[in-house]
Every structure is written in structure tokens, then in C-alpha cells.
Amino acid sequence: MPFGLRRAVVIVGLLAWCAGTASAADLLSKIYHFKSGVTLEVGAATDNGVRLDSVQFEVPEPVDGKITSTRSVVRSEVLISNTGEAPQRVGVAIALYDAEGILLGVASGGSALSRLKPGRQQSFKLVFDYVYAQIHRAATFQISVESKW
């Protein structure tokens, strides 16, 4: 077989293998009322069994109307369970908005290298970096959980 044809066969084979191993994804995305220091029990799940159990925010008190990085960190803790039958990779994103719908901060994270096994729960600690000075004005938040198997 000529080299060019052999190379084409290898490339087509690799493309077919990649298509067969590509992961599908489910997305859960909802908006909730924001409250700092309180655990919000959610219980919403994706179609493949990744459940958003709870969300909790830690927002320091503002000084002179702003939160500064020298005082402390704005963060959230998100608990996710896998109630499905297959291991899942999980991604989480949170956006905070004020009463007028102005975006005040975002954070994201997930299980990039490992998978959440069936019947297990994992805590994701997300930090709001770079844009956070007005987060104490938050009225709502949108959270998106993406699961990939």
C-alpha cells in the first residue's frame, strides 16, 4: 500500500475511534436567590444522575462599600452526588447578579482529571477571582452543572 494511502487509512481510523469515544454531556442550569452563609439544599439532577445537592457562599463583610482581596476570599462550596450508574466528570460554574441583573462575579471548577464514581459525593470549592468587589450586593445566582461520561 502506498504511503499516502496508508496515512489516509490511519487518519480515517483515528477519526472514527475519536468519534466513538467522544463523551456526551448533560447540563443543569438554574437561577436561585442568593444568601451568604446559608446552605441552600437543591436536589436538582441531570438526566444521567449527577445531582446538585447544595450550594453555600462565604462572602466577607465589605469595607467602605467594597470587598478587597486583602481582607479575605469570596468562595462557594458546591456538593455534587453521582446517583447514576457510570462514573462522571463534572464541571461547575456560578455567576452572581445584583437585583438589576448586573453581573458581579463568576467562579468555576470541576473534576478535570478524575471521575465522580456512582454512589459518591464530592465537594467543589470555587473561588471568585478578579471580579468580586461588589459581590455583597448579590441578589441571585445562576449555577450550571455539566456532567460528561
Image (cartoon, grey):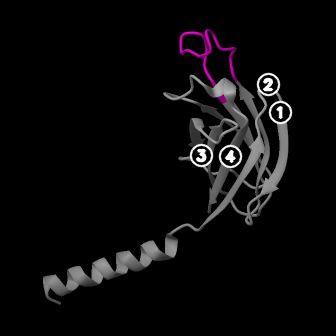
Q: Secondary structure at mark 2?
A: loop
Q: Position of residue 146 (x, y in %)?
A: 63, 55
Report whether 15 appears left or right of 143.
Answer: left
Left or right: where 80 falls relative to 114 = right
**In this rendering, is residue 134 above or below 141?**
above
CA–CA distance between discs 2 and 3? 25 Å
CB under 8 Å between callouts 3 and 1? Answer: no
Q: Main secondary structure of the magenta part?
A: loop
Instruction: Name the disc covering residue 37, or none.
Output: 2
Q: Amino acid at mark 3?
A: Ser
Local crowd at mark 2 within 10 Å, few (<14), some, or many (≥20)?
few
Q: Is residue 21 above or below residue 64?
A: below
Magenta segment: does it hold 67? yes
Disc 4 + disc 1, Cβ < 8 Å: no
Q: Could you say which is closer to the camera, residue 82 or residue 68?
A: 68
Q: Nearer the viewer, mark 3 or mark 1?
A: 1
Q: Does 113 appear in magenta?
A: no
Q: Position of residue 116 (x, y in %)?
A: 68, 50
Q: Pointer 3: what residue?
A: 111
Name the foreground residue: 78 vs 16.
78
Q: Is residue 43 above or below residue 76?
A: below
Which dot marks residue 39?
1
